[in-house]
Image (cartoon, helix red, strand yellow):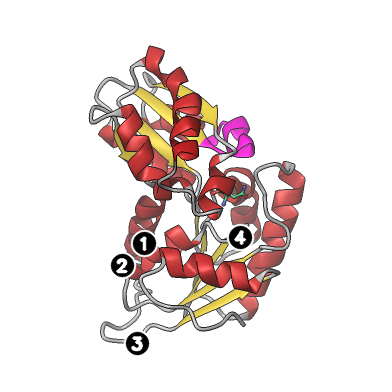
Amino acid sequence: APIGVFDSGVGGLTVAREIMRQLPDESLIYFGDTARVPYGTKSKDTVIRYSRQIVNFLLSKNVKAIVIACNTASALAMHKLQQEYIVPMIGMVRPGAIAAARATKNHHIGIIGTNATVKSGQYGKYLRELNPDVTVVTKACPLFVPLVEEGLIDDRITEDMVSRYLREFDQYQIDSLILGCTHYPLLQNPIKNFVGDNVTLINPAYETAKSLRELLKEREMEAESGHTAEYHYYVSDMEDQFLSFADRVLPCHVEKVQ
Ligand code: DGN
């Protein structure tokens, strides 16, 4: 059976990409809610309602596990959905927090994400559970999402936005920074250039795929090795934009959305 992966839109493809790399035998069904993106500016109740609809859709496709490949939906809806469903579910916040708690030496951790993710305080909550001494500094960077979607990765305007948003971290001496939004790993270079080599960038997309691998192994749910993985994509709107973004992010060409 396939793994269900969902996001508010195209960003979750950075998570799908990590799953394809780390779990090449697993088939995926990806749902991008491109008609209702962004989730980062919506209320918790709305994000829970949308996420629940998508989980029901994925379950109708007989998925064996679900990855919430959106930081905002993970922060706002994961807890509630896990109470409602028995299908194994993985969100991005816990794996990202665990990696940051492991990486930090001075216990000063920066977190960037959408307004909703930052406001939820979920990354901080997990981090403090893992390490009560941690100092957490957060900053919402909402303009990063459209910059990435416009393909302005190596552009002056993106460098400017990176320095505007991240210069606040200067005074806190963070040594680790959680890229707490699906789009931000694509800005790894400009962010790295700005924060320098002393700050470890934590990519929750990578960590989420790693957690999925562990979960499948633990529950003996892995696809047989050598099994040919199939990838299916569903979106709620704007197929062409989805396809062109997919070509920029994924290791394989996407022919069509269903
Ligand atoms: N996928 C969302 C996230 O990771 O928080 C970003 C896009 C959005 O809904 N604003």
Residue located farthest toward the front when viewing the structure as drawn: 156
Q: Is residue 177 left or right of residue 63?
A: left
Mark 4 beta carbon near ligand 1 (under 8 Å): yes
Q: Quadrant of residue 134?
A: top left
Q: Quadrant of residue 218?
A: bottom left
User: Eyeballing the image, is 15 above or below 44?
Assistant: below
Q: Residue at 69% x, 61% y: name it.
A: 52
Q: Which mark is residue 144?
A: none
- Which residue is labeled 1 in the image? 18
Q: Amino acid at mark 4?
A: Gly
Q: Nearer the viewer, mark 4 or mark 3?
A: 4
Q: Nearer the viewer, mark 2 or mark 4?
A: 4
Mark 3 vs 1: CB contact within 8 A: no
Sequence-wise, the earlier of marks 2 and 4 is 4
Sequence-wise, the earlier of marks 4 and 1 is 4
- Which residue is labeled 4 in the image? 9
**Kind of element beneath mark 1:** helix
Q: Amino acid at mark 2?
A: Arg
- Which residue is labeled 2 in the image? 21
Mark 2 vs 4: CB contact within 8 A: no
Mark 1 vs 2: CB contact within 8 A: yes
- Which residue is labeled 3 in the image? 228
Residue at mark 4 to residue at mark 1: CA–CA distance: 17 Å
Residue at mark 4 to residue at mark 3: CA–CA distance: 26 Å
